[in-house]
Image (cartoon, rainbow, N blue to C red):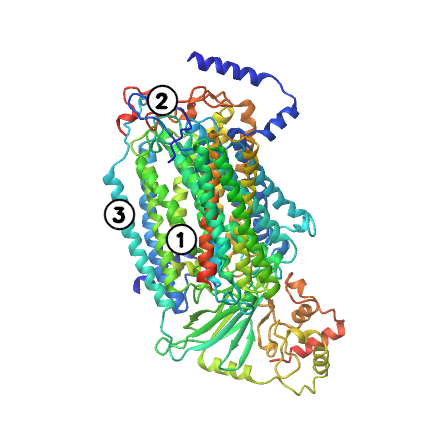
C-alpha cells in the first residue's frame, strides 16, 4: 500500500492527515501506461496479420513454445518481489540475493530468445523482411526483449550498488519502482506468449 | 506579512544586480526550474508559430489565383507538410505544455514539478526534434527548393511513405523529429500527472484543484495512450523503410489502412490534447472577468474526463471514405456525435458563469469571448462532419481544413492569446499594453474570420485539400483570394502581439502580485514568483483560496 | 422531397453568381449525391438552429451583464451550479444526437447497403500516380482518365458500379455532383455506385494526397444517353486502324512509337505496345483531354506533352522522351489517328 507521505502530515482541526502517494510509483505507473500503449499497437499489428503472409514460413511451421525462457522470466518476478520485501525489512543480504537471482533469470531469458532467433534465421531463413509473420514476430518479440535488456541493465546497476554496500532500507521504495517496471515486462511477456505462441500458431 | 516583504526585498535585490551574459545563458540551459522550462517551451513555440505562419502565407499566395506559379508543386507539398507538422508538434504541444509546466505547480501550491531533471530533459529533447525537422530544409536541393523537408502530409499516409514512393530522407526527418518530441511530451505528461497526484499542498483535495489543473491532468493521461501509438507506428514505418519490414507494404500483403488506424488512434486524441488546455485557460479567465465562480465545477470535471475517454473511441471518423463498411461507419458516427454532449455541457456552463455576472471586457476576456463563439461554430461544423454521408462529400476538402483551423486557431490559439495577456503579469511582473492588445485582437479576429469563415465555401464547391493549384472555372477563385487576404490581417495582428510581448517587458505597468483580483494560488505569489514559488507552503480549504481571504464573510468552503 | 427541392432552389438563388460551380455538393445529379444532400440539409438546419440559440444567448448575456462602471464594486451573487440545469442541458443534446444519428444511419444504409439492380454496369477503377485507369470487364474496353457511363432512368435504373483499387499510393474518387468520395487503396477493393440522371459532363478530381501531382489528377465523367453510350462502347471496342497508308507521317510515327520506350509503359491494342504502367492509348484521340484532365487534347499540346511532360505537369512520372523535332511531329501524327 502506498502509505509513504511526500509531505509531513500536520493534523489541522477539521481536515484529516495529508498523505499523498509516493512520486516514484506514480511516475512509473504513468510510464507503464505509455509503454503498454506502444506494445498494444505491436500486438494489434501481429494479430491483424495472422495468416496474411503471402509466402514464407508460418508460425506453426517454425515456432516452438519457449518454456524455459518463460519459466525463468516469470520466476524472476518472484525473486525481485522477494528482494523488495527483504530490503523493506532491512535485510540487505537477502535483497542482494534476490536481485542477483532476477538478473540471472532475466539473462537466461534473453539467451533463450537469442538462441531461438538464431535457429529461426539460420534454419528457416526467417528474417524481418521475409514476410508479414517475420515482420510482426521480430518487431514484437524484439521490442519486448529490448525492454528486458533495459531492465537488466538497471538491475545490474542495482546489484553493483548493493554489493558495494550503498543500498539502505530507506531505498526500498526506489527498488519497488524498479520492480514495478520488471513486473510490467513480465506481464507483457504473458501477452506476447499467448498471442504469438498460442493464438498465432 | 513581514515575512513576505523581506523576501520580496531580497528578490528585488537579486534582480537589480547585473550578471555576465554567459552566466545567464548557463543558468537557462542548465535550469530545472519549472517556470524557466515553461518559458523556454513558450518562446520556442512562438518562434515556430511565426515560421509556420510564414509557410502558410506562402501557400496562400500560391493559391490566391488559379494555375499560379509562385512556388513549384514540390515546394508547395513540402510547405503544407511542414506547416501542419510544425503547428501541431512544435507550436501547439510545446506552448500548451509550457503553460502547464509554469502554472500547475503554482496552482497546487507546490515548489516545482515532481521530477525537475526529467522536465529539463523533456524540453531539450523536444527542442532538438524541432531543430532536426527544420534542418531538413538544408538537405536535398537546398533551401529554395525546400530541401529535403518532408512532403508526405502531416499524417504521412502509407504507402506514400514507403521507400519506393518516398526515396531520400524527407520522410525520415518527419519520423525522427516527431519520435523525439514524443518522448519529450510523454516525459512532461508523466511529470504533470505525478506532480498533480503527489505534490498538492495541504487541503487541496482533487475536488479543490483549479479546473486548469484538472484539464492538464486529463490531457497528460491522454498523452500516454495517444502519443504511444504514433511512436509505435513510426517505429514500424522506419523498420519498413530501413530493414525491409512489411508493416505497410501493400505489395507484400501489408495494409495501408492499418497505418491510418494507428495514426488516427493517435491523431484524434491529439487534437483533444491540444484543445483541453485551451478549455483550461478559459475556465480560469471567464470566472475572474465575470466576477463569479465557475458554474458547475463538478460537471465541468466530469465533462472534461468524459471528453478524454470518449476521444479515444472516435478515431475512424477520419476514415469514413476508406470503405470500413456500414457497421464500422455507423459506430464511429455514434461515438463522434456522443462526444458533442460533454462538449456542449462545457459551453453551457461557461454561459451560465457569465449569466448574472459583471463582465469586464479586458483583453484576456475579449479573447475568451471570441473563443466561445468560435468554438461553438467549430463544434457545429464538427457535427456536420460526424455524419458519415455528409462526410463523404466534405472530407479531404477545404471544408475540413476550415473546420480544424476553426478549432486550432479560432478556439485554441484565441484562448492562448487570452492566456498570454492574463498570465504575462504574473510571469514578468508587468502588464501588457491594453491598447496594443485591442489592436491585436481586432486585426486578428477580422483576419481569422475572413480566412476561415470563407474557407468553408470552396470545400462545399468541391475543392480538395493539399493541392498546389486548381483549375479556373470551378468557382473557387474569389474564395481563395479572400482567404489569402485574411491571412495578411492575421499576420499583422500576430506581429503586434509579439511586439507587445517584447515592449511590455520593459515598459509595461508594474503588475503587483494580483492585478486581476483573481482567486487561485498563483496570484498569491510575487510577480514574477521567486524560484521556490511559496515561502511557506499554503494550506487551502476551498476551490478559491484567495476569494476566501478577500471575502471572509462569504467563504467558498461554506458552499462546497 | 418538396422541402429538399425548396432548399435546393433557395441555395441556388441565394448563391447568386458566386456559388455557381460545376463541382458543388449542393447540386446533386445522381441518387447518392441526392441522399447526402438531403441529409446535409437536415444537419445544416439543426446546427443552424443550435447556433442561433446559443450564440444568441451568449450575445444577450454579454450585453445584459456587462460591468457598468457606475455600479457598486460589490461582487455579484456567487452561484456554484444546479443539478437540474445540468441535467436539462445534458438530456436535450442527447435527444438531438439520437435523432441525427438515426437519420445518418438510414442514409449510410441506403447508400452502402443498397441492393444492386440487374441493369448495372461494372467498371473497374484503378488509381495511379497521377492518372485514372478505367476498365469495363464485361465489355472488353480499357480507357483512361475520362469515364463514360450511361444515364440512369429512375424507372429502370442502370447505375454504374465502380470497383476501385490502386496500383501505387492512396487516391480518392470524388465527383461531387454524383456521389460522396471513396478512396482507392492498394491491396484493397472498395466499391461505390453512381447513377447520373441527366446527360452531361461531371467534373471532379483525386481527393487523397498521392504525391507531387495530386492536384492535377482530374476526373471527367461523361453521362451519355443509352444510344450515345452504346455508340461510344462500340467505338472503344473497335481495334485500332491497321491501314494508315495515305498518311505517311502517321506510318512513320507508328514506327518511331513502336521502336521507342513508349511501348514499355503504354498499350495500343493489337500492337507490340503492351505496357501497363501508363494510360492505355488505343483510343487516345477520342479523348477531350490529356495528362488526366488539365491539358486539352490538341496536336500542339500532345506534341509538347511528349517532348517534355514536366513542362505541363511538373513531377509527373512520364519522363521526357528526348525525341528530335521530326520524330515528335511523326509520333503526334500517329497518335492523333488513334480514335
Q: Are marks 1 and 2 on the same chain?
A: no
**Foreground disc of the pair 1, 2:** 2
- Mark 1 and mark 2 residues within 8 Å of each other at the beta carbon: no
Q: Label 1 neighbourhood size at 10 Å, few (<14), some (14-19), many (20+)?
A: many
Question: In the image, B84: left or right of C46?
Answer: right
Residue denoted by label 3: C91
List x then y, in percent, for residue B496: 54, 34
Residue A32 seen in render: no
Q: Between marks 1 and 2, how big is the CA–CA gap?
A: 46 Å
Could you tell me which residue is drawn at 46 percent across and 13 percent down? Answer: B5
Residue C234 seen in render: yes
Helix, strand, or loop for circle 1?
A: loop
List x then y, in percent, for residue B239: 58, 56
Could you tell me which residue is drawn at 46 percent across and 72 percent down? Answer: C162
Q: Are marks 1 and 3 on the same chain?
A: no
Q: Residue furthest left?
A: C84
Question: Looking at the image, which is closer to me, A151 or B431?
Answer: A151
**Foreground disc of the pair 1, 3:** 1
* Mark 2 chain: A
Q: Label 2 neighbourhood size at 10 Å, few (<14), some (14-19), many (20+)?
A: few
List x then y, in percent, for residue B124: 58, 37
Residue denoted by label 2: A10
List x then y, in percent, for residue C248: 72, 83
Q: Between marks 2 and 3, how big is the CA–CA gap?
A: 44 Å
Q: Is B142 located above or below residue B550 in the figure?
A: below
Could you tell me which residue is drawn at 27 percent across and 35 percent down? Answer: C81
Q: Is A70 located above or below residue A129 in the figure?
A: above
Amino acid at each position: 500500500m502506498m502509505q509513504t507521505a511526500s509531505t509531513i502530515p500536520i493534523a489541522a482541526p477539521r481536515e484529516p492527515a495529508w498523505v499523498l502517494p509516493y512520486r516514484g510509483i506514480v511516475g512509473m505507473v504513468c510510464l507503464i501506461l505509455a509503454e503498454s500503449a506502444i506494445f498494444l499497437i505491436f500486438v494489434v499489428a501481429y494479430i491483424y496479420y495472422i495468416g496474411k503472409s503471402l509466402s514464407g514460413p508460418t508460425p506453426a511451421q517454425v515456432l516452438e513454445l519457449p518454456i524455459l525462457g518463460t519459466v525463468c522470466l516469470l520466476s524472476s518476478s518472484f525473486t525481485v518481489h522477494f528482494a523488495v520485501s527483504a530490503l523493506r525489512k532491512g535485510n540487505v543480504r537477502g535483497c542482494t540475493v534476490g536481485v542477483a537471482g532476477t538478473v540471472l533469470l532475466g539473462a537466461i531469458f534473453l539467451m533463450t530468445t537469442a538462441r531461438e532467433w538464431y535457429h529461426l534465421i539460420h534454419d528457416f531463413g526467417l528474417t524481418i523482411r521475409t514476410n508479414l509473420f517475420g515482420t510482426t514476430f521480430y518487431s514484437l518479440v524484439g521490442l519486448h526483449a529490448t525492454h528486458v535488456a533495459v531492465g537488466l541493465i538497471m538491475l545490474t546497476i542495482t546489484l553493483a550498488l548493493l554489493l558495494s554496500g550503498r543500498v539502505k532500507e530507506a531505498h526500498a521504495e526506489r527498488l519497488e519502482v524498479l520492480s514495478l517496471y520488471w513486473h510490467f515486462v513480465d506481464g507483457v511477456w504473458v501477452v506476447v506468449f499467448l498471442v504469438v505462441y498460442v493464438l498465432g500458431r | 506579512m513581514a515575512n513576505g516583504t523581506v523576501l520580496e526585498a531580497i528578490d528585488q535585490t537579486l534582480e537589480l544586480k547585473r550578471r555576465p551574459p554567459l552566466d545567464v545563458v548557463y543558468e537557462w540551459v542548465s535550469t530545472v526550474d519549472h517556470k524557466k522550462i515553461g518559458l523556454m517551451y513558450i518562446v520556442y513555440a512562438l518562434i515556430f508559430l511565426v515560421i509556420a505562419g510564414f509557410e502558410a502565407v506562402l501557400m496562400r499566395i500560391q493559391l490566391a489565383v488559379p494555375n499560379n506559379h509562385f512556388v513549384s508543386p514540390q515546394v508547395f507539398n513540402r510547405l503544407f507538410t511542414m506547416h501542419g507538422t510544425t503547428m501541431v508538434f512544435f507550436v501547439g504541444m510545446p506552448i500548451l505544455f509550457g503553460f502547464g509546466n509554469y502554472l500547475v505547480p503554482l496552482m497546487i501550491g507546490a515548489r516545482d514539478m515532481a521530477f525537475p531533471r526529467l522536465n529539463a530533459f523533456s524540453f531539450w529533447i523536444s527542442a532538438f526534434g524541432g531543430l532536426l525537422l527544420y534542418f531538413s530544409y538544408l538537405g536535398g536541393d537546398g533551401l529554395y527548393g525546400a530541401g529535403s523537408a518532408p512532403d508526405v502530409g502531416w499524417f504521412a499516409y502509407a504507402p506514400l511513405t514507403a521507400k519506393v514512393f518516398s526515396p531520400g530522407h524527407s520522410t525520415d526527418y518527419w519520423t525522427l523529429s516527431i519520435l523525439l518530441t514524443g518522448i519529450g511530451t510523454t516525459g512532461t505528461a508523466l511529470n504533470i500527472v505525478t506532480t498533480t497526484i503527489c505534490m498538492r499542498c495541504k487541503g487541496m483535495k482533487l475536488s479543490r484543484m483549479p479546473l486548469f489543473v484538472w484539464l492538464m491532468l486529463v490531457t497528460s493521461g491522454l498523452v500516454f495512450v495517444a502519443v504511444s501509438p504514433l511512436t509505435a507506428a513510426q517505429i514500424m514505418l522506419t523498420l519498413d523503410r530501413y530493414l525491409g519490414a512489411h508493416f505497410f507494404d501493400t505489395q507484400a500483403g501489408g495494409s495501408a489502412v492499418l497505418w491510418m488506424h494507428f495514426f488516427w488512434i493517435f491523431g484524434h486524441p491529439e487534437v483533444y490534447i491540444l484543445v483541453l488546455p485551451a478549455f483550461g485557460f478559459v475556465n480560469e479567465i471567464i470566472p475572474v472577468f465575470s466576477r463569479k465562480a465557475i458554474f458547475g465545477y463538478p460537471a465541468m470535471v466530469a465533462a472534461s474526463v468524459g471528453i478524454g475517454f470518449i476521444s479515444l473511441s472516435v478515431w475512424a471518423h477520419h476514415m469514413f471514405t476508406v470503405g470500413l463498411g456500414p457497421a464500422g461507419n455507423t459506430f464511429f458516427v455514434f461515438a463522434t456525435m456522443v462526444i458533442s454532449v460533454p462538449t456542449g455541457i462545457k459551453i453551457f456552463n461557461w454561459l451560465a458563469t457569465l449569466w448574472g455576472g459583471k463582465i469586464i471586457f479586458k483583453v484576456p476576456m475579449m479573447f475568451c469571448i471570441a473563443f466561445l463563439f468560435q468554438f461553438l461554430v467549430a463544434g457545429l461544423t464538427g457535427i456536420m462532419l460526424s455524419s458519415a454521408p455528409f462526410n463523404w462529400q466534405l472530407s479531404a476538402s477545404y471544408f475540413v481544413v476550415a473546420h480544424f483551423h476553426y478549432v486550432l486557431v479560432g478556439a485554441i490559439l484565441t484562448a492562448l492569446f487570452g492566456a498570454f495577456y492574463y498570465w504575462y503579469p504574473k510571469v514578468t511582473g508587468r502588464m501588457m499594453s491594453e491598447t496594443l492588445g485591442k489592436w491585436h485582437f481586432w486585426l486578428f479576429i477580422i483576419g481569422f474570420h475572413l480566412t476561415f469563415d470563407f474557407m468553408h465555401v470552396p470545400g462545399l464547391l468541391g475543392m480538395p485539400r493539399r493541392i498546389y493549384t486548381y483549375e479556373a472555372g470551378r468557382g473557387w477563385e474569389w474564395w481563395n483570394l479572400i482567404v489569402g487576404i485574411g491571412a495578411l490581417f492575421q499576420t499583422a495582428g500576430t506581429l503586434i502581439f509579439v511586439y507587445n510581448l517584447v515592449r511590455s517587458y520593459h515598459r509595461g505597468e508594474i503588475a503587483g502580485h494580483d492585478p486581476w483580483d483573481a482567486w487561485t494560488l498563483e496570484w498569491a505569489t510575487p510577480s514574477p514568483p521567486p524560484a521556490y514559488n511559496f515561502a511557506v507552503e499554503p494550506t487551502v480549504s476551498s476551490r478559491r483560496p484567495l476569494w476566501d481571504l478577500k471575502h471572509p464573510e462569504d467563504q467558498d468552503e461554506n458552499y462546497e | 422531397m418538396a422541402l429538399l427541392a425548396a432548399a435546393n432552389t433557395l441555395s441556388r438563388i441565394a448563391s447568386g453568381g458566386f456559388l455557381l460551380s460545376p463541382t458543388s455538393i449542393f447540386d446533386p445529379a445522381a441518387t447518392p449525391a441526392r441522399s447526402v444532400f438531403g441529409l446535409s440539409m437536415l444537419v445544416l438546419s439543426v446546427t443552424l438552429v443550435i447556433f442561433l440559440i446559443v450564440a444568441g444567448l451568449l450575445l444577450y448575456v454579454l450585453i445584459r451583464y456587462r460591468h457598468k462602471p457606475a455600479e457598486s464594486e460589490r461582487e455579484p451573487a456567487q452561484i456554484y451550479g444546479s443539478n437540474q440545469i445540468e441535467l436539462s442541458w445534458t438530456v436535450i443534446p442527447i435527444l438531438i444526437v439520437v435523432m441525427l444519428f438515426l437519420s445518418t444511419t438510414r442514409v449510410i444504409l441506403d447508400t452502402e447497403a443498397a441492393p444492386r439492380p440487374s441493369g448495372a454496369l461494372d467498371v473497374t477503377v484503378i488509381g495511379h500516380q497521377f492518372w485514372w485507369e478505367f476498365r469495363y470487364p464485361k465489355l472488353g474496353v480499357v480507357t483512361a482518365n475520362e469515364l463514360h457511363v450511361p444515364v440512369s432512368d429512375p424507372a429502370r435504373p442502370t447505375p454504374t458500379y465502380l470497383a476501385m483499387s490502386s496500383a501505387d499510393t492512396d487516391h480518392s474518387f470524388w465527383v461531387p455532383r454524383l456521389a460522396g468520395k471513396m478512396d482507392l487503396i492498394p491491396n484493397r477493393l472498395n466499391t461505390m455506385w453512381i447513377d447520373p440522371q441527366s446527360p452531361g459532363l461531371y467534373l471532379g478530381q483525386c481527393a487523397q494526397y498521392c504525391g507531387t501531382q495530386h492536384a492535377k489528377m482530374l476526373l471527367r465523367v461523361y453521362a451519355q444517353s443509352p444510344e450515345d453510350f452504346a455508340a461510344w462502347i462500340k467505338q472503344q471496342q473497335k481495334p485500332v486502324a491497321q491501314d494508315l497508308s495515305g498518311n505517311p507521317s502517321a506510318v512513320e510515327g507508328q514506327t518511331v512509337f513502336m521502336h521507342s520506350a513508349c511501348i514499355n509503359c503504354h498499350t495500343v491494342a493489337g500492337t507490340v505496345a503492351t505496357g501497363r504502367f501508363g494510360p492505355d492509348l488505343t483510343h487516345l484521340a477520342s479523348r477531350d483531354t490529356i495528362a488526366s484532365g488539365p491539358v486539352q487534347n490538341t496536336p500542339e499540346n500532345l506534341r509538347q506533352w511528349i517532348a517534355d511532360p514536366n513542362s505541363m505537369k511538373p513531377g509527373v512520372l512520364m519522363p521526357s522522351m528526348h525525341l528530335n523535332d521530326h520524330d515528335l511531329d511523326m509520333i503526334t501524327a500517329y497518335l492523333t489517328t488513334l480514335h
